[in-house]
Amino acid sequence: MEGWGADVIPRLAVDLKNELPGEKGFSERNIKRMVSFYREYPALGIVPPAVAQMHETNEALILQQLVAKFPGGVLGSP
């Protein structure tokens, strides 16, 4: 990247490393790959989980309560 915004990715990588010292995967190289992926597939976008997209029906509330009971969330991470 050249010109305006050229420092954004390097600064973001440093800021993320400082803010989240235990997390990995936010190197300058990986962030550039994330940007490339987004540019290649913009239609995918960022969408909320399916449960969050459901209308406020009784079934949706029951499902949200059940999902909340899973340890570590739906992905099972601690």
Image (cartoon, helix red, strand yellow):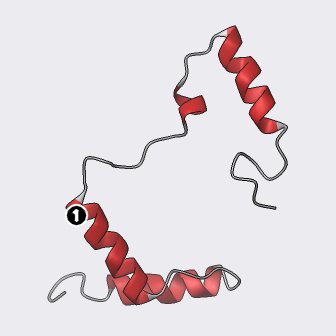
Q: Is residue 31 above or below residue 37?
A: below
Quarter of the C terminus within the rendering? bottom right
- In this rendering, would 69 be left or right of 19? right
* Picture quadrant where residue 67 is located: top right
- In this rendering, would 5 be left or right of 70? left
The residue under the point 41% across, 82% down is 30
Question: As shown in the figure, which amino acid type bears the numbered disc 1?
Answer: Arg
- Residue extending furthest toward the front: 76
The one nearer the camera, 30 or 18, is 30
In x, y percent, where is residue 72? 80, 53
Numbered circles on residues, count: 1
- In this rendering, would 44 be left or right of 48? left
The residue under the point 79% across, 27% down is 65
In x, y percent, where is residue 23? 65, 79
The one nearer the camera, 11 or 40, is 40
The residue under the point 85% across, 37% down is 69
In x, y percent, where is residue 68? 79, 37
Label 1's element? helix
The residue under the point 53% across, 80% down is 25
Q: Is residue 23 above or below residue 44?
A: below
Quarter of the N terminus within the rendering? bottom left
- Residue extending furthest toward the top: 58
* Picture quadrant where residue 70 is located: top right
